[in-house]
Image: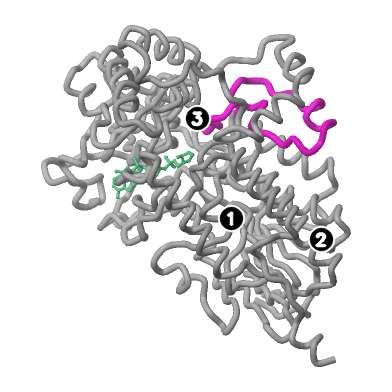
Amino acid sequence: AKRRPTEIVDVVVVGAGFGGLYALKRIRDAGMSVRVFEAGSGVGGTWFWNRYPGARCDIESVDYSYSFSEDLQIDWNWTEKYAKQSEILAYLNHVADRFDLRGDIVLNTRVLSAHFDEAGAMWSVTTSDGRTVSATYCVMASGVLSSIKEPDFPGLADFSGDVYQTSRWPDGGVDFSGRRVAVIGTGSTGVQAIPLIAKQAAQLTVFQRTPNFSVPARNRPLAAGELDQVRATYAERRQSARMSLAGFPEVPSPGRAVDHTPEQRQEIYEAAWAAGGGPRLLRAFSDIGTSPEANASAADFIRSKIAEIVKDPDTADRLSPKTYPLGTKRICVDTNYFDTYNRPNVTLVDVMADPIVEFSPTGLRTTGAEYDFDAVVLALGFDAVTGALMEIDIKGRDGEKLTDRWKHGPRSYLGVAVSGFPNLFTVTGPGSPSVLGNVVTSIEQHVDFITDCIEFANRKGHDIIEAADAAEDSWVRHVAEKASESLISTSTTSWYRGANIPGKPLVVLPYTGGVGTFREICERIARNDFEGFLFGAAKDSLDD
Ligand code: NA7
């Protein structure tokens, strides 16, 4: 790439998804110059990349949206209870236009490295198009589910059919009519894509390793007047989401499952199943996330539903998760997923029992059988939360690499800052509550907190903001302590705990203490002059 002169800005933001767009708006409004770099050819982040059939949010659209602008939330018309990918992408493009963000965003440009220069207290950022940018602050809005898990199946390169990755879906879509298709992966992505591919393909073979819990979305167009009702009470709705456990308004809870009879539980689970959506079932009782007995009752309920829906008992059994508690992997939210296995053109292969050995030119071979197909769809998931950060060559004080610092597991203060990496902020880093529910609620809080922290430093005339070692330590301990109260700490397969990536340290990545509690902690810290952060002067300015 050709060399360009160094550009100097106050803040470099990495990524133009929900996090990066709001960071740009908020930080620019605070009077700082911002340059955003985005690898995609458009804004939207997750919603730019994930264009596979059925891609849709698993949080209700009226909640999975920005709250920072009253006008925006009143003007925008969500058409369905759960928005599909194209609608969320249109929304984010609208946000980019409405707030005049595009002029500060450089598309098609990946950030390759960010090195901290101690003398001047500046970050030097290099990009894939050969730029070097010098910035006082670096804000990583690089996403929690953006670094994709690449396939490592032997022989894949020799496969003569088409290979599609769900998060790199061809623009304009794919026509599977008349083709024999394989899908590998049955997480939220596979569960959304499989029913639609099954309708089109001549034949679909699903290769499932770990079965997942899934509940019906009961998605539907929003009825006339429904949106107006939400608009009339948006302020309370947002406030409830901000103080909630998982970033969406709390549904009134009947209390603990263990205090109810099996009949009462059944009735409540049935109501949650009929209403649809992950949160309704996971929060049907307050103790599903913490009590093994309560959890088992909810898990049994879902298994009974699978057995009811899927006609072939053997297939139903293989689709039933048995090896981990409900909710310790993100619960899937589907439309006709289990029912799809009743179709004559759909076959389920259990690759836990019968692992994939290798691809061949015509398909793949497991330990027990050979399968031929014309196309394979890979829905293998992501190196979540830390992956996108670790992909960038980030060096802090003394040239220390972030990948070295996090070799034995990520460490962060509040999920937003790392000791030894001054003036670097992560919007939804490890130890933030963001990924457990509605990430947008957390993104807004994190970006506000980060901006307030920078403004505080500016007001006081400090050049450097850095998480104190001790504060980071105690936050990491607090996150671990909270995690140990949650069944997520027992999860052996979920990206919540890094368990889906071979060799990744097993650490519960999100803060499980709750979005509302986290907000209160941050507010207290901000009131106490950003306690836990060290503020200082650049060496150069001391020499003057
Ligand atoms: P997930 O939930 O991590 O699912 C990935 C799926 O791919 C899962 O079923 C994996 O099985 C499977 N997988 C991964 N590698 C392999 C190999 N090598 N062989 C067979 N199967 C494999 O990712 P999603 O994209 O579906 O969802 C991510 C999040 O996006 C979701 O939680 C929502 O928040 C939105 P495994 O479980 O590892 O046995």
- Of labels 2 and 3, the one closer to you: 2
Label 1 with label 3: CB-CB less than 8 Å: no
Residue at horizontal 39 percent and vertical 26 percent from the top = 214
Q: Which amino acid does label 2 sit on?
A: Glu
Q: Residue furthest right?
A: 31
Q: Which residue lies furthest to the left in this view?
A: 368
Magenta stretch, main secondary structure class: loop
The span shown in magenta is 55-83
Q: What residue type is labelled 3?
A: Gly
Could you say which disc has been placed on residue 414 in the image? 1
Residue at horizontal 27 percent and vertical 16 percent from the top = 304
Residue at horizontal 80 percent and vertical 61 percent from the top = 456
Is tag 1's residue or tag 2's residue first in the polypeptide sequence? 1
Q: What element carries label 2?
A: helix
* 10 Å crowding of disc 3: few (<14), some (14-19), many (20+): many
Q: Mark 2 points at which residue?
A: 455
Give the percent coordinates (x, y) of residue 444. Answer: 70, 44
Give the CA separation, mark 2 to mark 3: 42 Å
Give the percent coordinates (x, y) of residue 95. Answer: 77, 40
Quadrant (top left/top right/bottom left/bottom right) for the N terminus: bottom right
Give the percent coordinates (x, y) of residue 313. Answer: 18, 18
